[in-house]
Amino acid sequence: MSDEEIKLLELQRLGKLEKIRETDTSRQESLTNTKSLAKWKTSVTSLEDSLESVQMSQNSPENATQNILNTLGLSSGSESIQREFTREFMTDWQNSVLLMSSRGGGLVPIAEEAEAWARRFYRGNRVSATLILSGDSGTGKTMISNSLRAWVERMAIECAMSGGWSRSPSTEWVDWVDWWERYQDGRPCRDLSDIISSDCLFLDDIGAESDRYKSGQNTAILCQILGKRERKFTVITTNIPKEKWGEKFDTRVADRLKRNGAVYISFWGIKSFNG
């Protein structure tokens, strides 16, 4: 692709961002529309049922929104992050977080840690660049990780424009179980160098793979990836508790998972959505 084509794509993307800004500006006006208001009231009712600690005014959707955001720690900071992250949370995340809350999950810690990671990414601040979501199968880890990936991809150009990045950051999503199955069978899979070099890697479900040939390569490759991604943005999901990392993998992998201020979010205690 030529430089001219790349510039054209970026200009088109900027045009989309501008439309998003215009949409945000008119959002409050759209609430006066009967259909939008009805939809909003339904959302508020759902939140009231699941979050008793959030004091919301039934007569004021605007106040209800602010109370929700204050409770979740989403009401301060960069305007760009506020706009994009809040939209992502209030749409894609709303149902999943409500389900987590109703099943015993810690709503506020999950939201706060995810937002804090997003702020660091936006600014290119590589301190605590690794985010680890650990919990039982079906508790929403991949759902949260996917929401973060969507946010990162949508904000890529704006991240570069903000000065935190010298260019639009690249992303890679790796379903670890599927990738490993392909790798050990000799089938086509994502090149390891692309996984290691990506600006933001989403590594889903480590520890759930099966080492059929008892080669130990799955652990060795995981150790290699983690070792070469120090101070690079990485989001990992796993159903292995922190205290069992050394037993499931080995001490090298366990050590790398805990390095450089990696942020650990526990989903343990949340009932599985799988029943």
Image (cartoon, grey):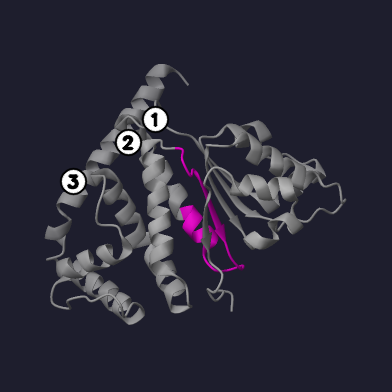
Tell me if I can see residue 66 in this picture. yes
Q: Earlier in the sequence, mark 2 or mark 1?
A: 2
The region drawn magenta spans: 126-146
Amino acid at the residue labelled 2: Glu
> From the viewer's perspective, is 261 left or right of 20?
right
Residue 176, given in percent of the width and then of the height, sits at: 66, 50
Q: Quadrant of residue 54?
A: bottom left
Residue 32 part of the magenta segment:
no
Q: Amino acid at mark 1?
A: Trp
Could you tell me residue 190's position as x and y percent? Answer: 66, 38
At x 65%, y 37%, the residue is 227
Q: Which residue is mark 2?
A: 158
- Near mark 1 (Cα within 10 A), the count class, few <14, some 14-19 or many ≥20, is some
Q: Are marks 2 and 3 in contact (CB under 8 Å)?
A: no
Left or right of residue 116, residue 54 in this image: left
* Residue that label 3 marks: 22
135 in magenta: yes
Residue 110 versus residue 172: which sits nearer the camera?
A: 110
Residue located at (57% from left, 74% from top): 272
Which mark is in front, 2 or 1? 1
Identify residue for label 1.
165
Q: Residue furthest top?
A: 3
Q: Nearer the viewer, residue 225 or 168?
A: 225
3 or 1: tag closer to the N-terminus: 3
